Structure formats: structure tokens, C-alpha cells
Image: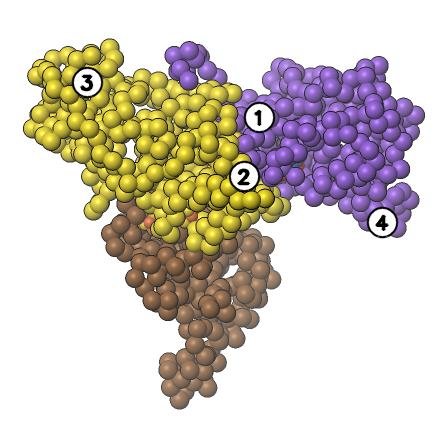
Amino acid sequence: MNLSELKTPAELEDLYHPVMAEIKEVKRLSAMETYYRVELPGGEDLGHMPGQFVELSIFGVGEAPFSISSSPTLKGSFELGVRRAGMLTDVLLRQQPGTKIGIRGPFGNGIDVEKFKGKDVLIIAGGIGLVPMRSMINYVIDNRDQFGKLIICYGSKSDQDLLFTDELAQWEKDPAIDYHVTVDQGSDSWQGNTGVITTLIPGLDLDLANTVCCICGPPVMYRFALLSLKSKGFADENIYMSLERRMKCGVGKCGHCQINHSYVCQDGPVYHYPDIKSMQEAL
Amino acid sequence: MADKPRVAIFDFTGCEGCELNQLNFEDQLLDILAHVDIVEWREAMDGQVDEYDIAFVEGSLSTPDCINRINEIRRKTKVLVALGACAVQGGVNGMKNTRPIDEVRQEVYGDDKYLFPTLPALALSSVVKVDYNVRGCPMTQIEFLKVFTSLVMGKEPIEPDHSVCVDCKLKENECVYEKGMICLGPVTRAGCDAHCPSFGQYCTGCRGLVSHPNLKGMEEILVEHGLSVDEAWKRLELYNANELEGVRP
Amino acid sequence: MVQFYLEGDRISEFVAHLMKQKPVYAPHRKGQKSFSFEKTENAEDVVLDYVRTMHSIKKYFLPPREELLHFDLTKNESDPVEIPMSEAVFLGVHSYDLAAVGRLDYNFTVGSPEKNYLTRRQNAIFIGVSFEPDKFHFSGSVGIRPEDSTGCDIFLTKLFDGYVLEILTDKGQELMEGLNLPAHDAGKPATGHFHQHIFVPQAKLSEVMEHSYDNPVWEETAGKCVGCGTCNLVCPTCYCFNVEENVDITATKGSRERHWDGCMLREFSEVAGGEVFRETLAARQRHRIFRKFKYISDQTGQPWCVGCGRCTTYCTAGISIVSIVNRLIGDYERAAVAPV
Ligand SMILES: Cc1cc2nc3c(=O)[nH]c(=O)nc-3n(C[C@H](O)[C@H](O)[C@H](O)COP(=O)(O)OP(=O)(O)OC[C@H]3O[C@@H](n4cnc5c(N)ncnc54)[C@H](O)[C@@H]3O)c2cc1C
Ligand code: SF4
Ligand code: SF4
Ligand code: FES
């Protein structure tokens, strides 16, 4: 590496300095999850693709990665869905519209939408995995003519934990969407499926040769989702998945997100399954 | 901050070395007091109140009366913070737990032992839920300030879970093993900025163990550096007798 | 290339000559048996004939603790931190430590180049010195010889009394102006031998590692290792860091700070909710060794270990990276010749 070929350091951007964005809207999604709509200075677009994430920070509290939940087709602001999990998310929960937060990004490899174009799109989302997948779902809905059928499988702990329920109701009604939902444990009023998310897969009506799938959910879900897809005859080639690891910098420097040789913040979070099949620590 | 948090301070069995008024907080004391209302503090004021937001509690529990008092404190407070090794792990007091309690009472109180119904020295957390710890013997000042500031800001304090060696290396101290000493830094929880090794002393482990210590490995290191197996475990037990009860082979 | 003779009793004069021009960072004695790079205040304190320092000169380009930004909580605003450029001379650097700087240059320029590191790194001037391998050095096995002057502006080779001084760049030439040293016409002495060796080159090591994922050595090492993280923190090519917020007691201002971190620590891969992606010490040891000989190396062809021997020297449990690697090589070769 020859240092003199680089821009001089003075011209480089400061990777760690956030821009101050404003929280425009806050909505409770469930007991643990909250929705935020965030606007960059001047209403500038974030310029992301589905599957990418931002590093969100509150001064004096901390910084953490969050998937962008809105589709790039939403202009002027972007959306997040945050689960209360610890120090930062706890403080975030108390923030009201008008609060300024630090944003860096978008970071990571999003979903390569070109690979999905002209194909049927199968989305498998478990729990909070719906947050990033919603970006892709709405992207497909807003670009209907570029994609085939949209098939959504969504699994949640209970019906109380379902996220974005207004949108779920629309997807359910939409004749162009094949929507399936299940909960591990339903309340008394729950009329839908119960059981883990993989129970939805065998019953799906898929055009195997022409369907591409993207999976996102808790770590335990991937292996079982893969097994079900395989027994249905789904080709590895057509599977993408979004992975999660501890992150600090988001820009390939701090080393926290590493899985074998790969940095999730650089090569992921969305991976093509054949690329990670042989990585021992990926799944 | 509209309403200042109401703070109460208590102490149980300990050497009183942790007591807030004995620490060198001169520089920060006014800032500390500016953030909170101290509503109960045995050292400095009389009277009792019914409710507080944060209770700082020093010392270990060693009598039935202690147990009643700590339960009452827990009922009255939203957040309970254990201050110092005695409160967090049982501290040096926990050493007596390695022997039968009757024998200890006989030794301390002689034939009057029946007048003093002492218990093994217990960490607060073995009786009530403790929300946060400020570790150390005496408690670590920098950690107290961190926990305090976090609570005032309404965020959760984070407890470090790496070894003292990390902080020691960040300061590029000469490892005290190089000087022929024996140090518990490799399995002791950081947060003191490697205070003792920075002054050329070995780490006695006052801040307690990291969350998943390899004790067999530590025993081997200590034995390799000249201790007998028994001495090695005595070292480890100095501040960790409660946690290590039944662990020693 | 011109060679000069720097006599033993003129070393201080040479250091003082450098100090007149720029700040000089050089090895000093520390404690009873150790050495560390320090800013030179007295020319006489510099020790060119040292074994190894606990930290390499990495600490000047990626400081152990570094503020990334300052914030004001009353205004909810932040300022970037001024990053000082190191217009400095790094004197007495061993070849493996300079090679390590080269590895870091790669990590901090690949993908998104990092302003912080590169600004600090930009104007550094290096004066290397040859070294006598002790029982832990093994840089020869990763292609870095004691007399290797790659990347240096000036290089010193140890003689019985004093040093052969070679000027290698214009910057080096500039530094030497005004100091008259006699020319050295004789050759340079051979440097010493290494006492430890890894027996195969990197190309082969990649192959060995490929087959070592499930080797029992990870479990065996984990039995002795206490997970203290020392081996990461003293490594000149480790660059992982954690980021934390510091808030002052008035709760009105503070800074976002990064500090060195290590993959041997359990909390390194722990996420909210308690999942730890490398839970066992065995998994963490494997990750550490693979990071040195496989993961980045498969992409660059170079080992990411420079053979300084620090991790082995400072490990209180006596875990030796050379023994681990040679064990993997041995097991791999035995398996290769064994009948199927
Ligand atoms: C690519 C990616 C996308 C994510 N998207 C979302 C999302 O859309 N919604 C959501 O609720 N959560 C998401 N997470 C998880 C989210 O980052 C963690 O819940 C969050 O870091 C918890 O921070 P905390 O300070 O509240 O918790 P603490 O436990 O106090 O964590 C302290 C710090 O550790 C690190 N950390 C802890 N857990 C994680 C984690 N799971 N992943 C990465 N770093 C972690 C962070 O730096 C964090 O600030 C995502 C994680 C990744 C890696
Ligand atoms: S002096 Fe103690 S704490 Fe410091 S590195 Fe050595 S063993 Fe670890
Ligand atoms: S220095 Fe030794 S004991 Fe400490 S983590 Fe490294 S290998 Fe384990
Ligand atoms: S998050 Fe820092 S390297 Fe990926």
C-alpha cells in the first residue's frame, strides 16, 4: 500500500462524526418496539438501499447500528424500528419529536435488488427481522412492475408483539401479496396460525425456478428456515440473508462485527447464501 | 433535570473506608450535590424518610438485623447501588465464610457468642436485588463518578467485564509479574484503571472476578509463579470467598 | 548509498542533533526490566540496544485512548477533535515494528480510509535499528530480518562499538545535514540467529489453517488461557477498538472515546440480549490465530503476524503463538502422509 497515492488526510471525511438529524415522529409499535421517522438536515435523502443500516447516537449515551426500515422510495425522511435492549435504546425510548440525534451512514451492503428484479420475491422475517425486511417489501410494492409475485412469511412471539400492524392488515388484503403470519403463542383473541415461522414454509405455493428469497430474524431462525426451504427444493443460489453481529464503527475498522474473514458492516449485513455456506461461524 | 433524584446513603458491616465522606471528592463534591437531594445519610443527618430514588449501600450483611434493614431499604428505593467490595461480593468479610460460622463466633466473641447471632458475611445481592455495583476496596472513585453521572442522566451504567490487565496494558505499565510479584489482574474485573499495578503493586482482586473466569488456568499461573495450590486459592478467595464457595477443588 | 560510522560515544550527539529538528520518539528504560517508546527529553536516556518495547510505535498512530469527538450536552452539539499530525522522528525502530505499521496502513486505508490514523501517520520519519533476536523473536519466519531496512529513512546496524548508519531517503539526508560522521567502508556485520521458527511459509500456512478449524489445540490452549486480552493489547498489528462515551460530572459535556479492544475478551462479541458469538476461549484463540495467519492473509498474501514475540513474552499463562502454529503444521503434515 502506497500512502502517497491516497488523498491527503485533510481531504478525507471524518468517518466518526455524525450529522444531526431530527426525530419527526415517534410511535409505539409494541411493548418492546418503537417506530421513529427521522429527517436529515434540509430534508436530504439518506440515499440507502433496502437492507442497509445507520449508526444512531445520542451524545453522552452511545451509538449503535439500526436497520433502515423505510423503502428508498420514501423521500425526505427515513424510518427505524427499535427494540428496547440496553443503554442506548432505553434512552432513545424517552425521546420526543423534535429531538436531534446523530446519524452516520447508510452503511453495509444492502439487498442487491437487481438480482430480485423480474422474479417472485419471498421474504421470511422473524420478530424484529421485519424491520429491515419492511424496506424491501415496500420497495417491491412501490415498484410493482419490476418484480413478480410478493410472498411474505412473518413470525412473531405473540400477536401482541406483531409490528407495523396497520401495514400487515394492508398486505393481507392486497390480492397481489401472498401474506402469511404465525405466532409462537397466540392470545385468546388470536385467530391466525400458531407455531414457529418454519411451519409456514411447506404450504407455500412457489415457482422454484423463478423465486428469490431474503431471510432476516433471530440467530436461531436461520438454520431452520434454510432446512425448510431446502426440503421444498429451493436452490441455495436464490437465498439471501441478513446477519447481525456486535458493531461499533460501521466502516470496517473496529473489528467487532467479524465472522471468519468477513466484516458484516462491509460485506453484509445482507449476504448471498452460497458465499457464507462454508463460513463456519456465520450461521 | 426538573426534579432532582432523592438519594439515601446507608452502611452495614465494613471498614467504613468506602464511606462517601471519607473519599477525596473535594473537587467533585459540589457538582455531586448539585445533582441530587440527599434525604437520608446516617453519618450526616438524623431522621428517616419513606421513599427515595437511589439508595447507595456500603458494607456486607452479617446479622439478622442487617437483613431486615436491607429489605426495608429495597422496599423504599427505586434503584439500589452497592458500594464497595463488602456490599458487592461480601468483601474481605467473606473470608470468614470459608470456615464454620460457629468456630468464627467462638473465636471472636468467646463464650458470649450466643449474644451475637452473626451470620456469614453476605453480599447485598444474596438477599435483595442490586441494580448496580461500584466495586473495589475501597470502592473505586472513578467508577462511582461514572455510575453516579449515568444515574443522574437517566441511563444505565455499564459494568466492565474485561480483566484488569486490559487497563494495565492501555497504560503500558510494566507487568508486576516482571518484578517477581503475583497479580490477580488477569481474572479480576476492570474499572479501576489498573490502580494498584500503576503504582507498582500487585492486584489483590478487590473488584471481584470477571464473569466467566478460567479459575483452573489462573491457579496454574499462580502455581507456576511459586504459590502452592492452597495459597493460590487463598489469594483468590480473599475477595471472592462467597462466589468461590464450593468451586475450589 | 553512503554508509557512515556512528561511534558508540557519539550516539547522544546524534540524538541531540535530531532533537534540534523535530520531536524524537525512541526506546527508553521502563521499570525494572522493560523498555517503552517515549518522547525524548534527554538524549542520554535513549536506549538503542533494547530487546523489545511492550507497545510498538503503533501507539502514536492509533493511540490506546483517543477522543473521536467532543460534545456539549446543553446544546446537543459536537465538535470534531483536532488530530495532530506527527511531524516526528521515530528512532530505534525494529524491522518487525515497521512492518507492522505497513500492515496497519493497509487496514486503515482499505475500504474507507480513516482520517484519524492517516493524519497521525502522514509525516512520520523512521530511523530503524538492527536487533539481536531473544528467545521470543521469530520475525525471520515471516520474512522480516533484523537487518531489514524497508520503510526506513535512516538505518542503523549494530557494530561492536557503535552503528553503521545508512541514509536511505531524501528525508533522511535532510535530517543528517550538519552532523559530520566518518564514512564506513567495511561491510556490515551479520546479525544474530533466531531461536524460534515457524517451519513453513505463509502460502503453506493458509493451507494448514484451512485444515485446522477443528484441531484439538484450541481446546488445549483454552485450558491454560485466562482470557485476559494481553496478547491482543501488546500486538503491533491488532487494531480493533471499542467506543465509549465519557461524560464529566457536571453532566453537561464529554467526549466519545475509542480505546484498544481485543478479540480474546468475552464481551468483544457480546450483543444486547446476552448472545456471545465467540463464547468459548477455544473459539477466541482460533479467531486470534486465524486473524494473524489466515483471514487477512488469504486476501493479501502476507501474514498479519510480524514475529515480534510480544504476545508470548507477556502472556502470564505462557502460551506461545509459535508452538500453536507449529503444532498445527505438524498435525496437518502427519494427516497428509497418513494412509486414508
Ligand atoms: C446491522 C444491524 C442492524 C440492526 N438493526 C436493528 C433494528 O432495526 N432494530 C433494533 O431494535 N435493533 C437492531 N439491531 C440491534 C441493535 O444494534 C442493538 O439492539 C443495540 O446495539 C443495543 O444497543 P444498546 O446500547 O441499547 O444496548 P447495550 O446492551 O447497552 O449495548 C451496548 C453497545 O453494544 C453494541 N451492541 C449491543 N448489541 C448489539 C447488537 N445486537 N448488534 C450490534 N451491536 C450491538 C452496540 O455498540 C451498543 O451500543 C441491529 C444490529 C445490527 C448489527
Ligand atoms: S501487572 Fe497484573 S494487571 Fe497488569 S498486566 Fe501484569 S498481571 Fe495484568
Ligand atoms: S495473554 Fe495469554 S492468557 Fe491472556 S488472553 Fe492471551 S493467550 Fe490468554
Ligand atoms: S462494525 Fe467496526 S468493523 Fe464492522
Comes first in the chain, label 1 or label 4:
4
Residue A163 position in % (x across, y down): 77, 36
Image coords of residue C303 (percent x, y): 42, 30
- Callout 2 amino acid: His
The letter of the purple chain is A
| Chain of residue at mark 3 | C
Single out the mark in the foreground, 4 or 3: 3
Q: Name the residue under label 4.
A: A187
Question: Quick check: do tags 3 and 1 share a chain?
Answer: no
C9 to the left or right of C241: left
Q: Name the residue under label 2.
A: C211
Left or right for A42, reference C167: right
Dot 1 and dot 4 residues touching (CB under 8 Å)? no
Mark 3, residues whose alpha carbon is within 10 Å: few (<14), some, or many (≥20)? Answer: many
Q: In this view, does B100 lie above or below B80?
A: below
Q: Distance between the residues labelled 4 and 3?
A: 81 Å
**Tag nearer the camera, 1 or 2:** 2
Front disc: 3 or 1: 3
Q: Is the C terminus of chain A in the top left, top right, bottom left or bottom right quadrant? A: top right
Q: Chain C is drawn in which colour?
A: yellow
Callout 1: helix, strand or loop?
A: helix
For the residue pair A33 and A236, the one nearer the viewer reads as A236
| Residue wearing tag 3 | C166
The subunit carrying tag 1 is A
Tell which chain the image draws in brown. B
Quadrant location, the N terminus of chain A = top left
Q: How far apart are marks 3 and 1 (CA)?
A: 42 Å
Amino acid tagged 4:
Ser
User: What x and y, as percent, mark residue A104?
Assistant: 56, 24
